[in-house]
């Protein structure tokens, strides 16, 4: 089981990271902190996606028989 994602601005917690993001954008939408967190999350998600695909591409092939 994954750890819950806690809102840094209130006491809400969410099992799903996307639910936390929606909460931040709806409940705390006018906060400058939320804008920064959402942008940071988008950047981290992009980097993670790039890293995962690179890892798969760089994985050595199994030797042929």
Image: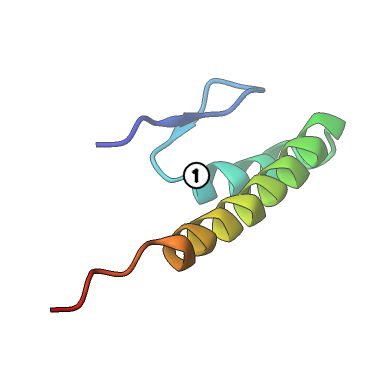
The quadrant in which the C terminus is found is bottom left
The reply to whether residue 26 is in sight is no
Horizontal side, residue 30 vs residue 51: left or right: right
Residue at (66, 44) in percent of width and height: 41
Measured along the vertical axis of the image, is residue 53 above or below residue 24?
Answer: below
Tag 1's secondary structure? helix
List x then y, in percent, for residue 22.
61, 49
| The quarter of the displayed image where residue 63 is located | bottom left
Residue at (67, 23) in percent of width and height: 9
Measured along the vertical axis of the image, is residue 21 above or below residue 36?
Answer: below
How many badges with numbers are in the image?
Answer: 1
Measured along the vertical axis of the image, is residue 51 above or below residue 40?
Answer: below
Horizontal side, residue 57 vs residue 31: left or right: left
Question: Please, which residue is most extreme toward the front here?
Answer: 65
Residue at (87, 33) in percent of width and height: 32
In this rendered view, identify the residue nearer to me: 60 or 53: 60
Horizontal side, residue 37 vs residue 17: left or right: right
Q: How is the image coloured?
A: rainbow
The quadrant in which the N terminus is found is top left
| The quarter of the displayed image where residue 21 is located | top right
List x then y, in percent, for residue 11.
53, 20
In this rendered view, identify the residue nearer to me: 21 or 63: 63
List x then y, in percent, for residue 37.
73, 36
In this rendered view, identify the residue nearer to me: 42 or 12: 42
The reply to whether residue 22 is in sight is yes
Read off the residue under disc 1. Answer: 17
Question: Please, which residue is most extreme toward the bottom here?
Answer: 65
Q: Residues within 10 Å of mark 1 (few under 14, many from 20)?
A: some
């Amino acid at each position: 089981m994954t750890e819950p994602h806690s809102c840094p601005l209130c006491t809400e917690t969410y099992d799903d990271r996307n639910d936390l993001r929606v909460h931040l954008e709806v409940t705390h939408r006018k906060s400058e902190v939320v804008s920064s967190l959402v942008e940071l999350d988008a950047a981290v998600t992009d980097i993670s996606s790039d890293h995962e695909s690179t890892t798969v591409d760089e994985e050595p092939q199994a030797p042929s028989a």
